[in-house]
Amino acid sequence: MLKLCELENNIKDFIISLKDDEISNSSLKIYESNIKQLINYLKDNNIDEIDKNVILDYRTYLLEKKHYKITTINKYIVIINKYLSFIGSEGLKIKQLKYQRKHFIDNVPTVIDYKRILRSAKKKDIVAYYFILIAAYTGMRVSAILEITVESLKESKKNSDYLKIHSKGKYNEVPFPAWLRRELLNYLKNNNIKSGYIFPSSRIKDSPLCRKTMWEKVHRVTGQARVNLEKGHPHAFRHLLGKELTKVVNDDLVVADILGHESLETTKQYQQKSKEEISKIINEFRFK
């Protein structure tokens, strides 16, 4: 049996241990927030002693009361289980929820959507415009794009058009189109950005824009382009690139290398159709 005070008193040490594993600051905040949400649930329900059934009830609460998606709940469970292991309460760990794998991929913009959003961004927000270009033509994750510097951009010319980037405690080399590098360098020159991050923060010196700010920028230009807002999140353009690449590159390993996937199963998701595409196929189908 685990006491609530034990759950509360070890959070700081747990977060410090994660820092040693070079987990990003944004992920550390998520870990801490998820654990504190569990603690608040226990306090709200006057639970001081915790057994496995309590953790199972919390999982049910997230599903039936909070109405979280199963994928979200499973992420919570991973974090909670990791914390329980850290404090020596392995016996309280629970399994993730099972769910039927979707055979379609949702909320990915079409090429037409992408072009409309890009035109909107070019008129309304040039930072969002260049962010979207990078995301759509490299498949880089948001955190990695925000870490791009003028220096790394210039160096990519000498590195066979591969951009060296340090993100989430890892060093990666990402194929980066030469035309895009030239266009970005011209934009940076015109805006007197000579060194440091290509998307610098206007509030914090020597820091890039934060993820939230970039998300808001992309969301805003998506709305202005009259495209479904669910298709206007920064990660959506990575998904778009994955889908389009699988149409022209008949080699999952190549697509996996471009997108930085560690598993081919992740790459294969882009071979799936959207709901709309599947609906179109079945509506047009006739037995011959």
Image (cartoon, rainbow, N blue to C red):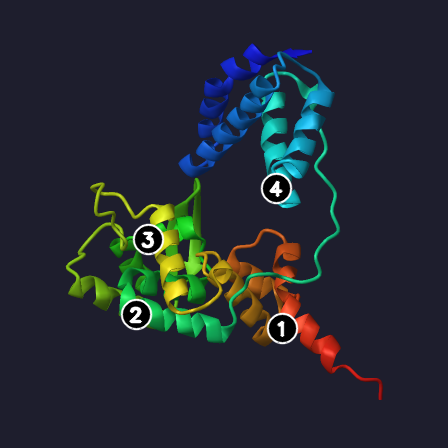
Q: Nearer the viewer, residue 127 or 279?
A: 279
Q: Which residue is mark 2?
A: 122
Q: Provide the residue designation for mark 1.
A: 250
Tell me which numbered mark, 4 or 1, is placed earlier along the sequence. 4
Q: Nearer the observer, disc 2 or disc 1?
A: 2
Which residue position holds label 4?
Answer: 68
Residue pictured at 72% horizontal, 21% vertical = 52
Disc 4 on helix, strand or loop?
loop
The residue positioned 80% from the left and 84% from the top of the image is 286
Q: Relative to residue 281, is residue 127 drawn left or right?
A: left
Q: Amino acid at mark 2?
A: Lys
Q: Is residue 63 visible?
A: yes
Labelled disc at residue 148: 3
Percent of width and height locating residue 28: 46, 32
Task: Give the Cα distance between marks 3 and 2.
Answer: 20 Å
**Amino acid type for the residue under numbered disc 3:** Ile
